[in-house]
Amino acid sequence: MENLNLVLPEIFISLSIMFLLVLGVFKKNSSIITFNLSLFAILITAIITINETFSVSRETLFNESVVIDSMSSLMKIITLIGGFLVLVISSSYLKTFKIYNIEYPVLILSSILGMMVMISSNDLIVFYMGLELQSLALYVLATYNRDQLKSSEAGLKYFVLSALSSGLLLYGCSLVYGFSGSTNFDVISNQLNSNEYVLTFGIVFILVGLAFKISAVPFHMWAPDVYEGSPTTVTLFFTMVPKIAALTVFIRFLYVPFLNLIDQWQMIIIFLSIASMVFGAVAAIGQTNIKRLIAYSSIGHIGYTLAGLATASNEGIQSSIIYISIYVVMNLALFSCLLMLRRKDQYYEDIEDLSGLSKNHPLLSLCLLVILFSLAGIPPLAGFFAKFYVFKAVLEQSMFFLAIVGLLSTVVAAFYYLRIIKIIYFDKEKDKYDTDHSLWLKFSLTVSTILILLYFIFPSQLIEVVSRINII
Amino acid sequence: MNFPILSSLILLPTVGALFLFFTKDKEGNNSTAKYVALFTTIVNFLISIYLWIYFDQSTSNFQFVEDRTWIEGFINYKVGVDGISILFIILTTFITPLCIISVNNSVKNRLRDFLIAILIMESFMIGVFCALDLVVFYLFFEAGLIPMFLIIGIWGGPKRVYSAFKFFLYTLLGSVLMLVAIISIYWITGTTDVIQLYELGIDAKYQNLLWLAFFSSFAVKTPMWPVHTWLPDAHVEAPTAGSVLLAAILLKMAGYGFIRFSLGLFPIASEVFTPLIYTLSVIAIIFTSFIALMQEDMKKLIAYSSVAHMGFVTLGIFTLQQQGIEGSIIQMISHGLVSAALFLCVGVVYDRMHSRMINSYGGIVTIIPKYSILFMLFTLAALGLPGTSGFIGEFLILMGAFKDNFLVAVIASLGVILGAAYMLWLYKRVVFGKLVNEELKNMFDLNRSEYLILSCLAVPTLFFGFYPDPLINTIEVSVTDLINMHNTNIASK
């Protein structure tokens, strides 16, 4: 008998989704209660995850198609926390646009479920099922503000491009299956050690599909449009949560089934990494919309995360996970600021709207200052340490070219972050923004900013948690 | 000694800044904020004097060392001082309160934020000079960019945005290569602890590249020709207090870095690259002196003279002679005092006339005599007149240079003449001559706080000019040991 306790989080969250859906359909005006219950459900799922799986070092279930190990439980917890925070700070934004409906939390929960399945997958089919579950929920979320043209456009674009990438992924999976005769990652890992060209095709297709999902250059085209068009809270969700799941799958693919083929994929990852870092830094310079800018900056940050993966070492994987965790916190802080730029039920999202913010909103500007310098990777803020660990791992493998290109692109990237700081601090002020923000929004901004600012005092804790992850 | 005196030196200004953050002043009246900041920095100065008194001059070992685990199994938070760094710490704690007194006139808006930036800056600067771990050093070294960027950008002149960006990006670009080098050192030797690295030594085959990576960072910060162009821009646009911090302390970080890291960690590479440093230094001395001669803007002139003076410093450091290095350290201290004073002098007339152009002044000696006397003193100190601290530094550097390379020393000596030329010509045009503008008659002489600041700077300039022994005694043992260590390393190659 399988130990079902290990998948209790997934079971619980799927039951909650069904229950909430039924509740929402049959009870009128139930959006508030659905929101609160879904928050509650995420919280309980997180607690179950911590209780049941956190101490498990590695176990497999269902004919070895699902794996529970320290990476999966850690990533699930980050996913859940991310989902919780997105939901909690969404409400006032959704109310403004009159889209405060029951579907929103249910969709978020289902995409989280999909991600959890993805994170634990040890089998091509389980992986693909999770991926599609999360993607379908995300397509709808992107168009969630359906009265706005841009939101619909974003959803459609995301759907078409993402479906394309899923197709590539499937094609790659079938090629790999053809060579190994199994869909199970561990079996594939044992079977694949030849240097057949067709197999290389399979790997390339899978990597391309995954690169699409994390928006690494040159498969990033959808990101700026989708990020700009989607409702801001959904953009926040996009930049944080699916990336965590996709990164986990990326790690899983590279280091379980393809472990013996490092020579074949390492160059691809290095290329993706360098291209993303450089492109993300350069393309962000000309942006005027904050959400677009964040899209390009997130492309750049994914590049750094991939740099850690390219090292083919446990150190590198751990540094990538640290990077993405710190990035999630910085992103949350940045979007909390963005959601505060509201004046009379209208949200502002152009960089110019930040002009002279420091005169009227000194505290908010100070938070932005910390966040932006941290994103730029200036010590002693958390963003510096994220980069520091990655480059430490990269240099351990003597990959000097990658490290130097990466660090030089941080200098280029620093330019556009500085430009925002310049607009906030050096330019003429505009009208005041509203200050009656929800408590949760203030809370998430304060906590994340303090985490960024004071991370340097206790840097060991995060490393300690992550150091339990030993894939190779 | 259990009390973490260095950490408290580093932290105290930040605590003061936090305190300031929560003080509220009435609109237009910032006296509370100013007194808080002043009090913090003066206490910090007193602590650093205490440090100097209890500092044991007879050993080159690091003293007041604190060593704590910071990132498990990787980096320790390690700070300590030796004869070289203690002087820079005192310079920092000495200059900062003077900056704070001087902000009265130059900073009109958001004084509280300005003071917070300066205090945080002080923390980082002291951190740089105390750090005994490469990563900790890098952290402080880079972190200083943030407050300085804001100081130039928010309170600077008309072209402040351009200057702030240039300052930030230039320095960042130089520094990232140093980060690569630091991490590489960790993987080569297994530690980033400076004291351990001194003992272990770094394999000769890596030294050249690592040296160049450190050099790229320090050269920008020093600044050495040809990457000095950010400095005049930054100086011209920064508010007076910002210029003072920049000239007096920020530039010294790089000189300190050259001595502590380039010489200490990479002795073989330092020998190899000495010709490069000599060439760049000599170019800096001669070339920027000529540029300084042509300047119309007083601040720019002094900025270029800083580049020339720092050229002497790098020259002295890489003579690898006792006199040369001691001279460089004294030159840095002296330049810290004198350039700070000169920028303040420019600030004084700028506050009254709102012009930094040399040709809008002239004949002010009879109108503001006290100012003219003090300005004279600092002009002479800048050109290295015997009896001022500037002389001791330049003299020792040239002595070291003559020992090592006659030609370089001769050319560098020409720089001294050029230095005299541009400084005296500046003084002549600003202070003497005919009264060019009727409005100048309305200028009033130094007020109490300006008088206090400039005298505070004048006293050590003269004192150490006549009696440099306290400085030399403090650094001597450390420098001797550094050179001995260097020579044994070279010999064992």
Image (cartoon, rainbow, N blue to C red):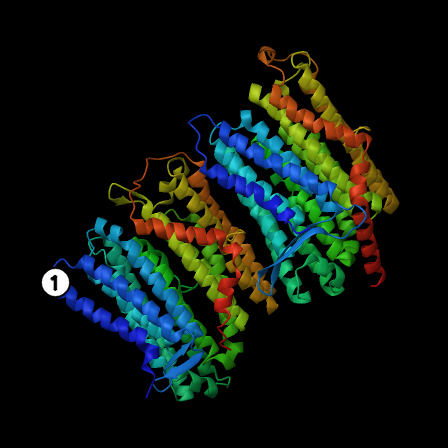
User: For residue A435, which quarter of the picture?
Assistant: top left
- Amino acid type at mark 1: Lys
- Is residue B274 among what the camera can see? yes
Q: Residue at x 48, y 51 (%)?
A: A453
Identity of the residue furthest to the front in this view = B2
Between B426 and A324, the residue placed more toward the observer is A324
Q: Is residue A454 above or below residue B311?
A: below
What x and y, as percent, mark residue A241?
36, 63
**Left or right placement of residue A26 versus residue A68 in this view:** left
The residue identified by callout 1 is A27
Q: Residue at x 79, y 49 (%)?
A: B478
Chain to which mark 1 belongs: A
Q: Secondary structure at mark 1?
A: loop
Q: Is residue B491 above or below residue B118?
A: below
User: For residue A111, which quarter of the picture?
Assistant: bottom left
Q: Residue at x 83, y 54 (%)?
A: B484
**Left or right placement of residue B454 versus residue A390 in this view:** right
What x and y, as percent, mark residue B52?
72, 41
Q: Is residue B253 above or below residue B110?
A: below
User: For residue B443, which quarter of the picture?
Assistant: top right
**Left or right placement of residue A333 versus residue B139 in this view:** left
